[in-house]
Image: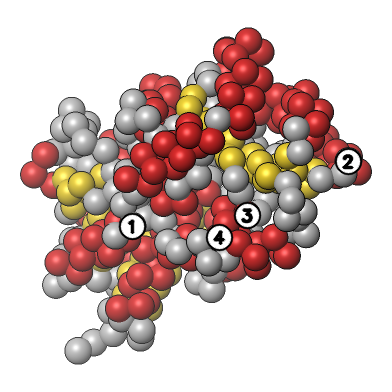
Amino acid sequence: MQKLKFILSGGGTGGHIYPAIAIANELKERFPDCEILFVGAKDKMEMQKVPQAGYPIKGLWISGIQRRLTIDNTLFPFKLFDSLLRSRTIVKNFKPNVVIGTGGFASGPLLRVAGFAGVPTVIQEQNSYPGITNKWLSAKASKICVAYENLERFFPKNKMVLTGNPVRQDLIDIHGKNAEAKEYFKLDADKKVLLILGGSLGSRRINQLIAKELVNFTSQNVQVIWQCGKFYIDEYQHFNEKEHVQVVAFIDRMDLVYASADFIISRAGASSVSELCLVGKPVIFIPSPNVAEDHQTKNAKAIVDKNGALMVKENELDTQFTETFNNLLSDQNLQIELSQNIKRLATPNATKDIVDEIIKLIK
């Protein structure tokens, strides 16, 4: 049998990159001698994160359309044309058996070209409200793996499979890693740990909130690991001088940070929500309101409606956050209830199920 080849494309944020890496790892597990190539957008975080995970990547000159008039918008037609030509060359030279897209702008030209070349394509849609790229690609896609029900109004029903979102395999069993985690992050074993996740790029509003609330946290015997994002590290790293506070731009050992956490404050991007279901710790979601169709609020609400998490919207932070957090901290029954309920919503086999669908398409 000839060697199998796969191209994966997804990027711009961790929410598109890590599902793609999880799928690649599962493909490698099943076909150790297969060849895997990633395609991303030049200057985006996938150009660092994918090689760190051990895979080669090629970059396209592509970016999204901004909502306001910018130089980037005027360049968009040229970028798209250039990316389509480069994608055509990549597909022609690499000769993949299947091409997989996990969202983000680079996956648009690549999957479009692959589809026209007769190569089977798989879209993996993480959100309850699909992004513009995946909606554009869906008509030509061979298979669409989704994480939420009722997406028939966006995608052809006969192509959809409900799989859940891929998550990193090292998160599937974090519960034996507590001692290692405490050591790794140099944590005080007698204090509760609060983990703050503002998304891979960071969240201005969450960072402002945490800066204001730090005294409240530390006065209640809570130590803080605060992922503020690469755009904000210069502004907030001086808080590292405070005792029991660690401010970082990015966290590489997510398995250990989740293992160490007693409580988590997080954005509600689809990948984060899927990971948090698996991790099973008490969560307060603060969804970003600045995303298409407010899909982060919908992602969080799907968990909150099943008593699996708490949610405070951005416009309610000043009035409701402190009380919500203090109630959670003091109510052990609530902590147990949230943990049990969110864990029931986990889809630990999502990556395997997606790869099953990919294998069905190999000619």
Residue type at mark 3: give it: Ser
Rounded to the nearest angstrom, the CA distance separating label 3 from label 1 is: 20 Å
Quadrant of image for the C terminus:
bottom left
The residue wearing badge 2 is 242
Whole-Å distance between the Cαs marked 4 and 3? Answer: 9 Å
Q: In terms of secondary structure, where does tag 2 sit?
A: loop
Q: Which residue is labeled 3 in the image?
A: 260
Does 294 sit left or right of 361 as displayed? right
Disc 2 or 1, which lies upstream in sequence?
A: 2
Give the mark toward the camera: 3 or 1. Answer: 3
Q: Give the CA distance from mark 3 to mark 2.
A: 19 Å
Q: Amino acid at mark 2?
A: Lys
CA distance separating discs 1 and 4: 14 Å
Earlier sequence position, callout 3 versus callout 1:
3
Give the residue type at disc 1.
Pro
Task: Out of 9 and 144, give the one closest to the viewer.
Answer: 144
Whole-Å distance between the Cαs marked 2 and 1?
37 Å
Quadrant of the drawing holding the N terminus: bottom left
Which of the labelled discs sits on residue 255, or is there none?
4
* Residue wearing tag 1: 348
